[in-house]
Amino acid sequence: MSDLHDEPRLAELRALIDGWLDDFATDNPLVAAVDRGTSDGTMLAEPRWYVRLIGEEKEYITVWLTLGQRTLRYETYVLPDPPEHRDEILDHLMRRNDALVGAAFSVGEEDAIYLRGQIPDTAVTDDELDRIIGTLYTTVEANFRHLVRRAFASKFV
């Protein structure tokens, strides 16, 4: 097993992510907000960032990036627990996972649907951060309308 990153390496990764987010947000009309905190609000917790993007199908898409000792985890909330056609929706998402690279739909707290992934800390680069944000954004945009129409089908009659 590899050693945990030391503080200088974690500081390097935090600076890389901060710098990339600053550049990404500059003059980008899709970026509504960028912020940084920690996973539980304490100084000792894992560093965590969020990027709030303006969508077309989904009003806002918020991507959370969490830097751990060995991985950068990322996720976005897609939809609450589907009240209708749940099995059909989950089947659709599991089949959709087969075509995704570096992310997968999953069921999280309160049975809500998320899109999540992770990469090793050693793979964090500007290009990889761009791929992560782009993948989560385009995947949510491509699937959101269908998911909402099936999950809340009786509202569209």
Image: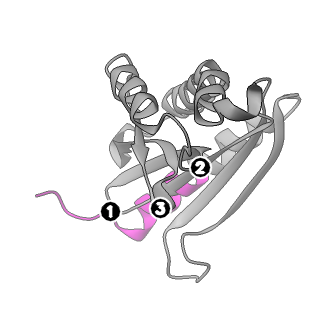
User: How far, Cα to Cα, is label 1 from label 3?
Assistant: 29 Å
From this viewpoint, which residue is outermost toward the left? 1
Residue under label 1, please give it: 5
Q: Nearer the viewer, residue 15 or 150?
A: 150
Quadrant position of residue 35: bottom right
User: How far, Cα to Cα, is label 3 from label 2?
Assistant: 9 Å
Give, as a single range, the part of the protein colored magenta. 1-15
Residue under label 2, please give it: 80
Residue ID at (54%, 70%): 39
Residue under label 3, please give it: 109
Going by the numbered disc 1, the residue's amino acid type is His
Label 1 vs label 2, nearer the camera? 2
Task: From the top left corner, tell me how far across and down residue 133 is, in percent.
Answer: 59, 32
Q: Nearer the viewer, residue 95 or 102?
A: 95
Pointers 1 and 2 in contact (C-beta within 8 Å): no
Residue ID at (62%, 79%): 41
Task: From the top left corner, tell me how far across and down residue 13 is, in percent.
Answer: 49, 52
Pointers 3 and 2 in contact (C-beta within 8 Å): no
Label 1 vs label 3, nearer the camera? 3
